[in-house]
Image (spheres, coloured by chain):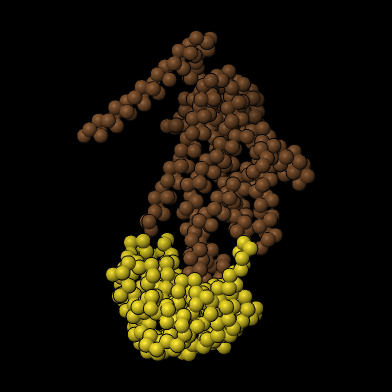
Chain colours: A yellow, B brown
């Protein structure tokens, strides 16, 4: 589904160069749920953002569904509609109602008719548990509700893969559960998911595979059982001691 | 209750200050030898125009039909050519069987005509409206170029903005009229509107740029992650939000534009200011007319700010 080969992303700022992602190779299979964890600044968010072209690569390759993103001839807009993304800060469109948030890209990008797009939007709102909020504006929703709308908005494009960039980090603790529940349901339905998160419980319960990143490098990977009970690398052990 | 009383007493103080300022002004103008002639002003807004109807040949009046508002006068010439004229009922100047010579007045039609001040107000209004719309379009395009990733577009827009903002509007109007007007053979009105529009465009561009840059980066990222291309994201996501945020500064800019439009009177466009000057030359009511002109500008600008305030309230539903 997604294959990255020696992916590198370097930020060049005032006199200093930061290797945010420093040669990550990974292969994500269809219907697989991959959770990426690691300390802040480890490059896991940057890696995720590279996967749908929000960051341009410094070197390496990303192949999604057989299409090479690093190829100049690739139309990133065509790739992005197959790759849904959920952000830490929700990024709902504040000037559009909940329903319009979900409908807009379907109409503009997928060229769906209004009735079809609205029907799909209502179905997805029901799925994420807030069908009654369709006419509200995002500002009037709680963080958890906003993030669920954001998930519905991404799902409306019928993506083959969903990327989650710390989807619960900006939420009040009591709202984390409702968002994770939606994600778990999605995983059960067989969606291919790549999740950057600090929720170790979610990783343990839902992930098929856990990737641990530190300083832009993929340090260790494995099944949750292996990863949480018998980590091999010293850095992984140190990280787990701090978070568990 | 206490707060209401306090606010009320402060309002009284405001009124007192304004009143004493007015009284001081009144006393001061009393001391100079100036006769106020406010009664001369209204006729320069609208006036009753008397239009004389005359016979084109020697003739005799055969019939006068009196209607409620107008009278129809029928005349017959020596060659038996009949012709009818319509004049106002109370303004018939002939009677039946009266012999008329070529050029005699049969009667008058009266009608209300807009005076120079009203005509000038209208000119200022549509001049500013045209310049605002053009200025908004120019500003929008330049603003988008200003935030473009293309270096040439960015540099060109900065070049334009710097030149326009760094030179006085009065000088720009002269250059547009005397230089471009001659080179490109454009009329004074086109030169005037273009100068105002290009002037306003430079400021609007900076307002739009600031508006676009004030939208969080995540909005563009969210739009792109859904597969929208940059123009789609701009049209559906970024610009509507930027427009809402830039409405107050844009309103200020367009209010300035209405006021700045008074400068086109220097290239002999008969706007409100020039009309005012023309009326003064025939009435010598200098003080009155300038006060009236100032009031008319104030009227235009306050109507505009009310309209924009209304639009702002409409857009506030998503806040």
Camera-side residue of A2 and B146:
A2
Number of numbered discs present?
0
Camera-side residue of B236 and B44:
B236
> What residue sits 46% from the left and 83% below the top?
A234
> Residue B73 appears at what percent x and percent y?
53, 30
Q: Is residue A35 visible?
A: no
> Residue B57 appears at what percent x and percent y?
65, 28
Q: Is residue A222 visible?
A: yes
Image quarter in which the C terminus of chain B is found = bottom left
> Going by the picture, which residue comes out furthest to the left?
B1
Question: Does residue A70 sit above or below B301 in this rendering?
Answer: below
> Residue A70 appears at what percent x and percent y?
62, 80
Camera-side residue of A168 and A229:
A229
Camera-side residue of B51 and B152:
B152
Question: Does residue B188 sit above or below A52 in this rendering?
Answer: above
> Residue B26 appears at what percent x and percent y?
45, 15
Question: Does residue A153 sit above or below B251 in this rendering?
Answer: below
> What residue sits 44% from the left and 31% below the top?
B69
> What residue sits 59% from the left and 30% below the top?
B273
Classify residue B191 by image quadrant.
top right
Image quarter in which the N terminus of chain B is found = top left
> What residue sits 55% from the left and 82% below the top?
A24
């Amino acid at each position: 589904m997604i294959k990255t080969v020696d992916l590198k992303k370097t930020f060049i700022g005032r006199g200093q160069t930061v290797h945010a992602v420093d040669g990550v190779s990974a292969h994500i299979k269809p219907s697989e749920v991959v959770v990426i964890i690691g300390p802040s600044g480890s490059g896991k968010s940057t890696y995720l953002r590279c996967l749908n072209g929000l960051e341009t690569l410094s070197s390496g390759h990303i192949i999604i569904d057989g299409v090479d993103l690093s190829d100049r001839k690739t139309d990133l807009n065509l790739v992005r509609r197959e790759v849904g993304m959920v952000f830490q800060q929700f990024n709902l469109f504040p000037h559009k109602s909940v329903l319009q948030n979900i409908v807009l890209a379907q109409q503009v990008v997928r060229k769906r008719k209004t009735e079809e797009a609205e029907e799909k939007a209502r179905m997805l709102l029901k799925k994420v548990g807030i069908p009654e909020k369709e006419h509200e504006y995002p500002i009037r929703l709680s963080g958890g509700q906003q993030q669920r709308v954001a998930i519905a908005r991404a799902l409306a494009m019928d993506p083959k893969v969903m990327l989650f960039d710390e989807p619960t980090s900006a939420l009040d603790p009591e709202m984390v559960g409702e968002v994770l529940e939606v994600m778990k349901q999605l995983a059960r339905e067989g969606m291919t998911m790549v999740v950057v998160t600090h929720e170790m419980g979610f990783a343990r319960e839902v992930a098929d595979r856990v990737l641990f990143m530190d300083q832009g490098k993929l340090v260790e990977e494995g099944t949750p059982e292996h990863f949480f009970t018998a980590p091999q690398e010293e850095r992984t052990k140190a990280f787990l001691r701090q978070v568990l | 209750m206490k707060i209401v009383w306090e606010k009320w007493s402060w309002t009284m103080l405001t009124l007192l200050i304004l009143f004493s300022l007015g009284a001081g002004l009144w006393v001061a103008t009393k001391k100079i030898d100036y006769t106020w002639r406010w009664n001369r002003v209204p006729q320069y807004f609208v006036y009753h125009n008397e239009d004389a109807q005359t016979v084109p040949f020697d003739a005799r009046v055969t019939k006068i039909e009196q209607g409620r508002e107008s009278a129809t006068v029928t005349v017959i010439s020596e060659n038996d050519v009949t012709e009818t004229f319509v004049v106002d009922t109370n303004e018939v100047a002939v009677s039946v069987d009266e012999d008329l010579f070529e050029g005699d007045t049969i009667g008058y039609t009266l009608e209300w005509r807009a005076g120079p001040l009203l005509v000038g107000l209208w000119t200022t209004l549509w001049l500013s409206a045209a310049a605002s719309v053009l200025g908004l379009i120019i500003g929008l395009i330049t603003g988008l170029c200003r935030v473009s990733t293309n270096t040439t577009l960015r540099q060109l827009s900065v070049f334009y903005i710097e030149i326009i903002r760094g030179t006085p509007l009065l000088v720009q109007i002269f250059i547009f009229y005397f230089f471009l007007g001659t080179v490109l053979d454009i009329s004074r009105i086109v030169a005037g509107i273009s100068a105002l529009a290009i002037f306003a465009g430079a400021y609007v561009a900076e307002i739009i740029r600031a508006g676009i840059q004030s939208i969080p980066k995540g909005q563009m990222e969210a739009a792109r992650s859904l597969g929208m291309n940059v123009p789609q994201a701009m049209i559906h996501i970024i610009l509507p939000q930027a427009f809402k945020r830039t409405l107050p500064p844009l309103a200020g800019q367009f209010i300035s534009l209405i006021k700045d439009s008074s400068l086109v009177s220097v290239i002999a466009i008969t706007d409100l200011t020039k009309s005012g000057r023309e009326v003064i030359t025939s009435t010598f009511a200098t003080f009155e007319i300038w006060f009236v002109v100032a009031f008319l500008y104030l009227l235009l600008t306050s109507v505009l700010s009310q309209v924009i305030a209304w639009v702002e309230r409409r857009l506030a539903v998503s806040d």
